[in-house]
Amino acid sequence: MAAVSSMSKMYGLCFHAVRQTAGLKASRLLQRRGFRVTVVQLQQPFDSSLEKPQFPGASAEFVDQLEFIQPNVISGIPVYRVMDRQGNIINPSQDPQLSKETVLNFYQKMTLLNTMDRILYESQRQGRISFYMTNYGEEGTHIGSAAALDPNDLVFGQYREAGVLMYRGFPLDHFMAQCYANADDLGKGRQMPVHYGSKDLNFVTISSPLATQIPQAAGAAYAVKRENINRAVICYFGEGAASEGDAHAGFNFSATLECPLIFFCRNNGYAISTPTDEQYRGDGIAARGPGYGMLSIRVDGNDVFAVYNATKEARRRAVAENQPFLIEAMTYRIGHHSTSDDSSAYRSVDEVNYWDKQDHPISRLRHYMTARGWWSEDDERSWRKQSRKTVMEAFERAERRLKPNPELLFTDVYQEMTPSLNKQRESLWRHVQQYKEHYPLDLYEK
Amino acid sequence: MAAAARLFIRGANSKLSIAPSSLGVTLLKLSPNCSSRTKTQRRHATHFTFQPDPVPSQYGPTQKMNLFQSITSALDNTLASDPTAVIFGEDVAFGGVFRCTVGLRDKYGKDRVFNTPLCEQGIVGFGIGVAVAGATAIAEIQFADYIFPAFDQIVNEAAKYRYRSGNLFDCGNLTIRAPWGCVGHGALYHSQSPEAFFAHCPGLKIVIPRGPIQAKGLLLSCIADKNPCIFFEPKILYRAAVEQVPEEHYTIPLSQAEILQEGSDVTLVSWGTQIHVLKEVASMAQEKLGVSCEVIDLQTILPWDIETICKSVVKTGRLLISHEAPVTGGFAAEISSTVQEECFLNLEAPISRVCGYDTPFPHIFEPFYTPDKWKCFEAIKKMINY
């Protein structure tokens, strides 16, 4: 009995903390964190006359009833939202009351991303690019979180966060150049499509291995903390990647080393074909946060304002208090995992249609805008026409562009060229000179 | 028995000793079979004698330091001159299990020298992040044997960061240090030399010093180098290797092999502890066979100094490479393959590899496993008489 009540007290603390965060009242939580730090730091001398446990590993009470703690999976951590599925504000105090200009920008960035996705997906089908991954259904998670950050905040992503780059102003030409691996690619044509990166926009280049960015984000946040320049780090990953050992490592390190870091989990229901009930048995990813001593929240990822509010508050506190925050954004992956996937093999068309038609971040925001008279049918038509045009123009430019010079195969392995690599480069050059008709030299810059 | 008694006596002297250890001593004294030293309990001497380098004169005033002290000195210099530098890993705060970081936390602060949770993939991943954010990251892995959870972060991430981003991002500011190699009793998980696993990974640098002077200079080069470096420290030398080491900052260039002794008949190549074995072998060969050996310390395993080795083999015509790591797929295989490509017609005999056997590193069989001076000596004899 006592075990349950003390456990529920602890979980109660967490839920209460979650509700407090949801209500954006930070002061009580601040006190609670202060208490936690004090308990950790003031190690009282061990005293066997006290009936309190003296273990260095945990400070709790003794209990004399045998009871296992129930993981709270049925009624788990609640989902914070601002708008209902029709785009109506539920609790006016939660409306971030962003300007018309800002909200229109949200909408235009989400739809531009959607348009670019459609065109590039199709271009892969036609054999113009080798591979693509769409962001359908998750645009709200990208735009809402990106808008809540400072442009200087460092972003570590997984691979389905193109909207963050788009929000920050990454030109369409650069997106296309990377997918086409042409001579304009900032990455010099070395990686598969959608592995974007931008130094100027503080977006660390994407890599394929999952979750490797999570402990890296913790390290970057630690370095940034030492610089003391009001800079945060955000780390995106999916609910599947959260199963990797690197995720556990990143969470634990960021909490013990007190890093100003936001962990943003896009829980979209699938890791390729693996649904969430085969990925975890606990209450999603948000429930793991308290286990690491981390403040956590679950939000409606298809509600761009909920995402915005949570990220904004997490960012503010992460920097002010030097601690990590975990945001689990619930959403749905409407598209296939990638162009190499056909998701009808493992889920029904009806399921996908539900999310596409009845709970889509773009529609919900549009309802919000039309309700305020900020967006009309004409606006929609002309914007669609304009965005398609700009995407197609960038697409055609990217198609025409040559690939990078094959010399770039050998550079940037190290900062400097090594004698051995130089020899290999020269050997390739001589070989290609001799067998030039067998190599597609005319597609590449000289 | 003597060894066991020594263990308990040592325990009795330590600060942490309590009732159990004196009980142990009493039990041993009273047991009739433990009264005399038996043949089976003799402790085996090390398979090498550390041969110190001459005192360097070009780097300023020197001080007597052993290997771990020379590492501390390098780290001290770094923390003093580079305000972004941080050192982290398991147990580094109190000074480290091999005392390499003693005094640094007190001197430079707990935000710069700190413990991490027990997680190698986290240590390296975290280190990569620190480096990517522009700070100097010095990560310690407690034993090279435990570096494997971090293999993905090292090989798939650190090594490829610059290349895959088109030079937008890199983790050149990362240096990973780990104790390396046999120690007499380390067995499978405290004796490994994993350099060959990483040698197969373009983008990394791998460096192994033979003594304190080299260690400090090479470590400082690794820290300064704009590429991720792995620095393996021969743990058996931490206390045993003592030299006069310059107090100030100095660097020894990477990717440059060092010819320690010139010779005309055979080229002997190794790195780390094994250099001291080869130096002795060279003396034995001269004395007993009249054979003149050229001894080369490779120092940097990747990228390795092909030119110096090949130039030497062109001169001598014979090559012996020796390392503790298992022979199959060991780094000697790479050197051997390249040298036969470049110097085929100069070779008087097949290239010889005297290495560990293709077994995990054993405990009680270490004296038989080790590529000792007798095995190297025998290999030279065979090459000379080919």
Image (cartoon, grey):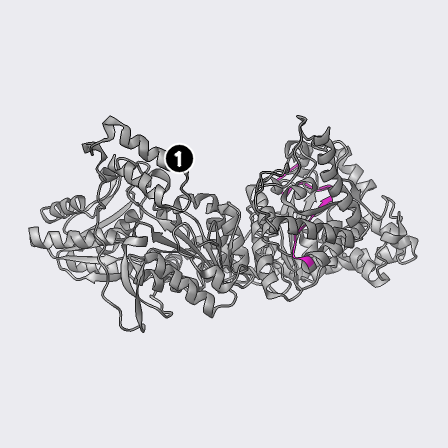
Residue placed most toward the observer, B44 or A313: B44
Residue placed most toward the observer, B142 or B356: B142
Tell me residue B59's x, y (percent): 31, 72
Magenta stretch mostly in which secondary structure?
A: loop
Provide the chain ID for the residue under circle 1: B
Give the crowd class for mark 1: few <14, some 14-19, many >=20 residues within 10 Å. few
**Amino acid type for the residue under numbered disc 1:** Pro
Tell me residue A154's x, y (percent): 63, 59
In the rendered structure, the answer to whether residue B110 lies left or right of residue A9 reads left
Tell me residue B77's x, y (percent): 42, 67
State the SS at label 1: helix
Residue at mark 1: B20
Q: How many numbered discs sit on the rendered protein?
A: 1
What residue is rendered at 85% in x and 62% in y? A99
Tell me residue B60's x, y (percent): 31, 74
Q: Is residue B373 above or below residue A349?
A: below
In the rendered structure, the answer to whether residue A357 lies left or right of residue B367 reads right
Visible residue check, residue B355: yes
Quadrant in which the N terminus of chain B is drawn: top left
Residue placed most toward the observer, A344 or B322: B322
Q: Which residues are magenta?
A: A321-342
